[in-house]
Amino acid sequence: MAPRAEPQFVCSKCDAQFLRWTGRCGECGAWSTIQEIGAASAESGRIETTDAKPGKTVTFQSLTETSNAPKQSIGFEPLDRVLGGGLVDGSVTLLSGEPGIGKSTLLAQAALAAAAGDPSILYVTGEESPSQVALRLKRLTGQIPSTLEFLDATDAAMISATIREQKPLLTIVDSVQSLFHPEIAGVAGSISQVKACAGLITEAAKRSNTSVILVGQVNKDGDIAGPRLLEHLVDTVLMLEGDQDHRFRILRVLKHRFGSTEEVSVLTMTEQGLSTVDDPSAELIKERPIQTSGSIITCLMEGHRPLLMEIQALVTPAGYGTPVRRCSGIDAGRLGLLIAVLARRAGINILDKDVYVNAAGGLKAKEPAMDLAICLAIASAVSDVAIDPKTAVFGEVGLGGEVRPASIPHLRMKECERHGFNRILVPKGSITDPTSQIVEVATLRDAIDQSLVSS
């Protein structure tokens, strides 16, 4: 009997395998994600393992000392914060973000900070020459530590061998999509190559007890490029978010085997690189226009950190047959849903008007707790009535027009009060004793009546 044909195509989003190419993945429904992988041997079949030797087992008690070993601080506060104090020896971290967002700058600062303590740091660059990296490092600090070494290579086997031989404290690889394995078919960045290269470097990191940070690229949808296996393979996944035309960035944790995923670092881009913003709420709202319709403050949660953000809205008569819906920093589908709720449940008919909504500061806001702020900003823009500048709101809006509770309301209210907001609209049930400063609202209509004031 002829051997069974092996799948030669795989979806880069869900890792589903197919025998032939198709434009749409039948498992996850994504379009244009099916990529060819190296063809399996026609004779490949069941593999016998009769010659395999049994492995050596250990008890958990013998691992007590290792499990209690402290993390190695990088010396760069934004990274140390999100990693829960530093890197675990032998761990592999994937840092991803859009082009130009500051990934290389962030890792250059991390390499300089780590090398300042005189450990051996290896910086592997496959996208830039060592001289180009050196120029960036000199721009950041003016000098390069002697313990920081460079390797200009894209051969994953060579990089793996270097890590095993030198055993540096930290290795930075920029980027995993630029690497290739000489024994694997396919061009650099293909699914088969990314899997093989990442697996090879991960094995070298574990065997040499070296911490590795891999730089990963993102696709047009903002997801990490390459196979989903890449995220499963590494120990930690970091995402650097923001708008390259704005100065603020958010470094968040998507996966962390050695700590919490609730920590974030808010950064700002300066001439000296990325620096931590001590009070991001104050920075984000300090340029807010006063007594202008369509503007309101909301409080989001980035991990365990409350963050104030201004939501702006502009409503104009539709200049063409189809009304325009434009937004920046928020989900376009969510905006369409909230516009429909405003029209049906609150009596604010804007279905024939152009609506523009912006999350000021260039940050992306995905939390449902900003629904109420979006609705009130639109209502304010439609009526051209300003909302009291000392009013802040938060809450999720349901399809029935009800205002639903948000998580950790006490931290949100405390952050609003700390920045001088003396009137806070919150979902009903958020507090036990409403006051004149904290007003509970049950419906979107109630919130509109409570927030709009005459100029």
Image (cartoon, helix red, strand yellow):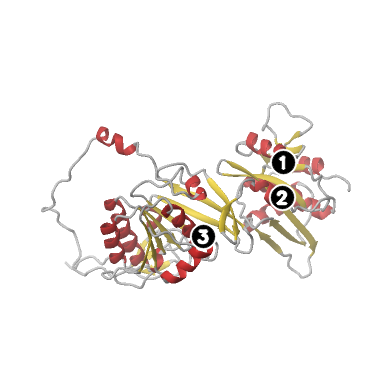
Q: Find out whether the residues at labels 2 and 1 contact each other: C-beta distance under 8 Å.
A: yes
Report the residue marked by disc 3.
141
Of the two numbered discs 1 and 3 on the same chain, state the one appearing first in sequence.
Answer: 3
Of the two numbered discs 3 and 2 on the same chain, state the one appearing first in sequence.
Answer: 3
Residue 40 is situated, as x and y percent measured from the top left of the image, at: 25, 68
Residue 437 is situated, as x and y percent measured from the top left of the image, at: 77, 33
Whether residue 222 can be seen here? no
**Left or right of residue 8: residue 102:** right
Helix, strand or loop for disc 1: loop
| Callout 3 amino acid | Thr
Report the residue marked by disc 1.
419
| Callout 1 amino acid | His
Residue 278 against residue 431 in the figure, above or below: below
Residue that appears at 53% across and 64% down: 139
Q: Quadrant of the N terminus?
A: bottom left
Residue 398 is situated, as x and y percent measured from the top left of the image, at: 66, 44
| CA–CA distance in space, label 1 to label 3 | 35 Å
Helix, strand or loop for disc 2: helix
Q: Residues within 10 Å of mark 2 (few under 14, many from 20)?
A: some
In this orientation, which residue lies closer to the viewer: 270 or 297?
Answer: 270
Report the residue marked by disc 2.
285
